[in-house]
Image (cartoon, rainbow, N blue to C red):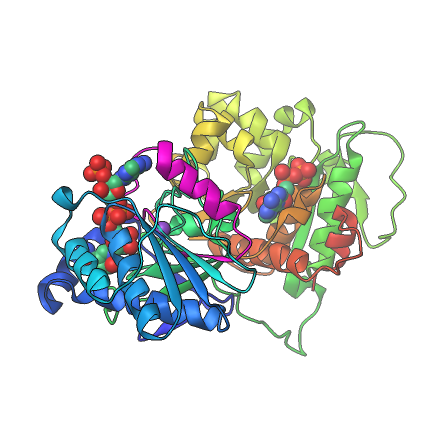
Amino acid sequence: MRGMHPITLDRAWPLHGGAATRRLEAQAIAAAGPHVLMRRAGLAAARLALALAPHARQVWIACGPGNNGGDGLEAAMHLQHWGRQPCVRWFGDEHRLAPDAAASLARARAAGVPFTDAMPELQPQDLAIDALLGLGSARPATGDLAACIAALNASAAPVLAIDLPTGLAADTGQANGPAVQAQHTLSLLTLKPGLFTGVGRDLAGQVWFDALQQCATAQADATLAGPPPTRTRAHASHKGSYGDVAVLGGAPGMRGAAVLAGSAALHAGAGRVYVAALDSGPDLTTDAPELMWRAPAELALARLTVACGCGGGPQIAAWLPQVLAEAAQLVLDADALNALAADEGLQDRLRQRRQPTVLTPHPLEAARLLGSSTAAVQADRLAAAQTLAERFGAVVVLKGSGTVVAAPGQAPAINPTGNARLATAGTGDVLAGFVASHLAAGSSASEAARHAVYQHGALADAWPAGQALTASALARAAN
Ligand SMILES: NC(=O)C1=CN([C@@H]2O[C@H](COP(=O)(O)OP(=O)(O)OC[C@H]3O[C@@H](n4cnc5c(N)ncnc54)[C@H](OP(=O)(O)O)[C@@H]3O)[C@@H](O)[C@H]2O)[C@@H](O)CC1
Ligand SMILES: Nc1ncnc2c1ncn2[C@@H]1O[C@H](COP(=O)(O)OP(=O)(O)O)[C@@H](O)[C@H]1O
Ligand SMILES: [K+]
């Protein structure tokens, strides 16, 4: 792919982690020659800088001690040529410079780029560039480097990060120390998974990509998912064509969760939806008379797509052996996952299942299933989701910012849609209902999971600003 591109939601994008990027970089340098890529990188960054801030007079460029700093020095040189006023704060040691960064330092000096130790007073229309650290960020920044990160984050002008916002881990989307919060990030050579999950989306802002005239030949480590295919309904179809979903959950005090999942399945297109609540009280009055209430024992599990666990409480555990053995297709959420985590016998039954199965844990539920902690799951969300998928032979949806969908033997996908308006009670039940409806309609477990998380996030992204996003409204908004 040639030129620079904003990352948009209308297609899928391959993602490469640090190790794969380093391999591609070495191949590209061997083919193109020394310093060629860094010159391309700096030119791309300078072009994007001017496109983002066409009226900028001052451009403050923070350059680190490695090749990321070299990219910044190249950009400074171009901006100087183009009549802007770049000002570089450089953190390098001339005696320890890599050859490419040393060449860029010499070129910037020859171009007369000014160097400074001070943070200038930037106006809102000016620009700051973060070229402190990229792939080589090895430990938390301290001292002057940390102060520079703080100054960038306090800047009145927008911040463009080169390759990665300083401090963001390319593979995991985590920041273990001070990190730059950019409005734009220009990812070079490859797109890195960390830009799209964990804290990556908050730190990177709008992501741009320039492949530096290379085509990534390496197999992708992950994918940024594209939109699901649009499916039209055949005229000669009927409700039986779209499958039957049953929601099993709703223990006393938590019936709403089962109703939310049922309503979501219904609105997302399931042919028929049954709700089997573990609370034996009267049926909950809902604004969805289409939902059919059943006792759990009445469900013909072997011909149903079952969303199991939504508000199920500890009582759900007793139903799991039968559900795992019989359900034609299965989504395990919330309390069903907690019951599984607490019972190795149930885990064995899950591994023995041959029918399509999707697990939808949030990070704490994933931690319980892995016997680890939420922090450990969040430290590497892609690895946590993949480990669960391989361990249980199921599709796993690890929820949260940059939801990860993993399947055994496949590279994981990061979902690009969604935002923090989804952080409200019950939206997870709605997601389980969406997954169930797509499974019931005939999608594979992997397709159903990817479709549902994309749709769920896209609804939140399109939600009107002044209107509350509640789980029940989200379920009804499905299309
Ligand atoms: N080579 C090429 O042609 C191309 C390279 N490209 C660009 O290169 C970038 C990768 O460059 P890189 O490998 O030099 O790593 P980079 O991110 O600059 O940092 C390494 C330096 O930082 C230091 N350091 C680390 N952490 C630190 C800390 N907390 N506090 C203080 N210092 C710290 C570390 O020191 P050390 O750990 O060795 O002591 C070392 O000196 C990549 O992201 C892309 O932008 C593109 O132009 C494409 C072409
Ligand atoms: N900050 C966020 N960004 C994107 N998605 C989010 C965010 N917070 C929550 N979500 C989404 O909202 C849903 C919440 O699910 P869950 O935690 O199971 O909630 P509940 O149990 O209340 O239904 C998940 O799909 C999750 O990915
Ligand atoms: K950077």
Q: Is residue 65 visible?
A: yes
Residue 136, magenta (yes or no): yes
Q: Is residue 412 visible?
A: no
Q: Position of residue 95 (x, y in %)?
A: 12, 43
Q: Residue at x 50, y 63 (%)?
A: 126
Q: Residue 359 at x, y = what percent?
A: 53, 40
Foreground residue among 173 and 324: 173
Q: Quadrant of residue 179?
A: top left
Residue sticking out furthest to the bottom: 235
Relative to residue 169, is residue 457 drawn left or right?
A: right
Spot occupied by residue 356 in the image (x, y as percentages of width and height): 49, 48
Please say if 54 is above or below 223. below
Q: Residue at x 38, y 41 (%)?
A: 167
Q: Nearer the viewer, residue 212 or 17?
A: 212
Q: Quadrant of the N terminus?
A: bottom left
Quadrant containing the C terminus in the rendered view: bottom right
Residue 42 lies in the magenta stretch: no
Q: Residue at x 68, y 79 (%)?
A: 235
Q: Nearer the viewer, residue 129 or 162?
A: 129
Residue range (magenta)? 132-161
Number of disc labels:
0
Q: Quadrant of residue 7?
A: bottom left
